Image: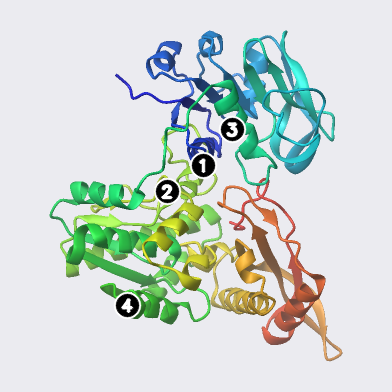
């Protein structure tokens, strides 16, 4: 018999399906993911008190949509539909869904029109996060629109008698005001859940799990000096002791001065048994002539795997490869096990070749960056380490648009260093999720000393986020941007113009590729 739970989150392939489950768990609710086509009988056997229909990339107007057993809407327990799930409720219960005149992505404001059960703890007007093209034009019989967006779209509807609710916006993302209160109202006030689930001692549970999985085998842990891989190394070390060997691969795509700083952290400060391999030449060779971002990611993942295999044969044997993979890596790579679309292959997920002989150990595969930072602090990894900006394992290769050349790599590295230095001086660095520079093949005309120049365009990117699943561009002071621009054009040879990216995630991703 399946384990009992309070709320089942039906996964229709939305990038945030797992995040809904995580937010409910943060509230103390026992929530689990389930297939979109889960049967009414299975819902009953699981003892669910409520159901959440997640968002998804499909359109309810298309013929091919993720399968669903509409009977789950009629078994008498509360249902909350979010985005695609909101539209699905309308379609299945007799409402009408249309493609909107204008899509809504990012923050917008909604206004509560009348009394609502799950919106009772919000202000009459509040900001939400939208990500949709289709809209509910006419709600089903028995449903009442209880909130509309600035564009007049039905932002929330509910049928109080059947206890079925629909939200066009995403309450699970941090950029929606009162999102926690809305989910709390559904879980506790509507579904009658009790605060019975607690995160528990993740470290203790995971150490026991690793011991059981690894047995007497040896583990090779890929480390980059970032929060995720370093915390994974320390955690795995607690489980296997001296059977852990760490490997730091310098692929030549790191930030300025990063290789030396990483080795100082891992070896001197943390006392890890770590080997350093300089593989920069082979990575640049593997990337030569490659312009497509997906091909670059796959090439880097394949080269990493080759280095791991070679090191394992020379220094091993090792049976396991440990990585600091996070859930956003998994979901963007389309490897969550559900119907989520692939956004881009992460080198440590979609980029790893299928023939890898090492078994993969990923203790944080179900977690988010902020959760790993909490675990790092609990393990004693504190100070500036836990506040480091996320840096992709593919390094600057995804911040260099087009082919990665030594000149473009230099411009990207030096420009990013200037940007981060000025942010540190302004006391803003630790308030941002990420900040970096991007360079491509575009060149613009400039003037230097009364002479015409033809140099690269550098784009600065800075965002605020809590988990990397959504992000807003940072409203940095104009004076700061001015200083950064002047320094880059003066100090970094080959740059003629600096721009600033002002797109959110979604519709953009944080990294340019």
Q: Residues within 10 Å of mark 2 (few under 14, many from 20)?
A: many
First in residue order: circle 1 vs circle 4: 4
What is the CA distance from the residue labelled 1 to the residue labelled 2?
9 Å
Measured in 3D between alpha carbons, the distance from the residue under mark 1 to the one under mark 4, in whole angstroms, is: 36 Å
Q: CA distance from mark 2 to mark 4?
A: 29 Å
What residue would you read off at disc 2? 350
Q: Quadrant of residue 104?
A: top right
Please tell me whether mark 2 sits on a helix, a strand or a loop. loop
Per the rendering, the mark at residue 342 is 1
Residue located at (42% from left, 32% from top):
196
Quarter of the figure with the C terminus: bottom right
Q: Which residue in the structure is indicated by mark 4? A: 267
Q: Which residue is mark 3?
A: 184
| In-front residue for pair 374/40 | 374
The reply to whether residue 435 is visible in this rendering is no
User: Is label 1 or label 3 in front?
Assistant: 3
Which element carries disc 3, helix, strand or loop?
Answer: helix
Between discs 2 and 4, the one toward the N terminus: 4
The foreground one among 115 and 470 is 115
Q: In the rendered view, how is the structure colored?
A: rainbow
């Amino acid at each position: 018999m399946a384990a009992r739970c309070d709320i089942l989150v039906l996964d229709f392939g939305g990038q945030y399906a797992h995040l809904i489950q995580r937010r409910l768990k943060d509230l103390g609710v026992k929530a689990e993911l389930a297939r979109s086509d889960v049967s009414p009988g299975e819902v009953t056997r699981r003892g669910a008190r409520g159901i959440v229909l997640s968002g998804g990339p499909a359109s309810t107007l298309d013929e091919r949509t993720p399968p669903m057993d509409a009977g789950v809407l009629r078994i008498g327990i509360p249902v909350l539909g979010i985005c695609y799930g909101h539209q699905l409720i309308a379609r299945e219960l007799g409402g009408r869904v249309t493609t909107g005149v204008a899509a809504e992505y990012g923050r917008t404001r909604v206004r509560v029109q009348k009394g609502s059960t799950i919106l009772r703890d919000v202000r009459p007007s509040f900001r939400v996060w939208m990500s949709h093209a289709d809209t509910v034009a006419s709600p089903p019989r028995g449903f009442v629109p209880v909130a509309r967006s600035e564009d007049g779209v039905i932002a929330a509807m509910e049928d109080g008698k059947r206890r079925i609710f629909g939200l066009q916006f995403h309450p699970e993302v941090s950029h929606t005001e009162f999102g926690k209160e809305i989910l709390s109202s559904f879980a506790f006030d509507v579904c009658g859940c009790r605060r019975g689930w607690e995160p528990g001692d993740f470290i203790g549970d995971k150490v026991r799990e690793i011991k059981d999985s690894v047995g007497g085998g040896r583990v090779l842990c890929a480390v980059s000096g970032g929060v995720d891989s370093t915390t994974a190394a320390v955690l795995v070390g607690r489980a296997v002791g001296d059977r852990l060997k760490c490997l730091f691969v310098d692929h030549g795509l790191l930030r300025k001065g990063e290789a030396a700083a990483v080795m100082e952290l891992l070896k001197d400060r943390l006392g890890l048994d770590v080997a350093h391999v300089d593989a920069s030449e082979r990575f640049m060779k593997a990337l030569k002539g490659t312009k497509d971002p997906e091909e670059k990611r796959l090439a880097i993942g394949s080269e990493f795997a080759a280095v791991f295999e070679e090191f394992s044969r020379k220094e091993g044997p090792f049976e396991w490869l440990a990585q600091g993979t996070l859930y956003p890596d998994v979901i963007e790579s389309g490897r969550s096990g559900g119907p989520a679309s692939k956004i881009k292959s992460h080198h440590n997920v979609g980029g790893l070749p299928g023939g890898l002989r090492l078994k993969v150990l990923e203790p944080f595969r179900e977690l988010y960056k902020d959760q790993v930072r909490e675990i790092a602090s609990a393990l004693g990894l504190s100070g500036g380490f836990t506040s480091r900006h996320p840096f992709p394992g593919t390094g600057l290769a995804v911040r260099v648009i087009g082919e990665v050349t030594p000149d473009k790599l230099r411009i990207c590295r030096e420009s990013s260093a200037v940007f981060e230095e000025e942010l540190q001086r302004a006391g803003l660095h630790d308030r941002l999720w990420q900040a970096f520079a991007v360079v491509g093949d575009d060149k613009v005309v400039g003037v230097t000393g009364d002479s015409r120049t033809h140099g690269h365009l550098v784009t600065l990117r800075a965002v605020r986020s809590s988990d990397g699943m959504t992000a807003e561009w940072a409203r940095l002071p104009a004076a700061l941007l001015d200083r950064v621009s002047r320094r880059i054009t003066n100090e970094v040879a080959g740059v003629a113009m600096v721009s600033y990216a002002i797109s959110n995630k979604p519709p953009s991703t944080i990294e340019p590729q």
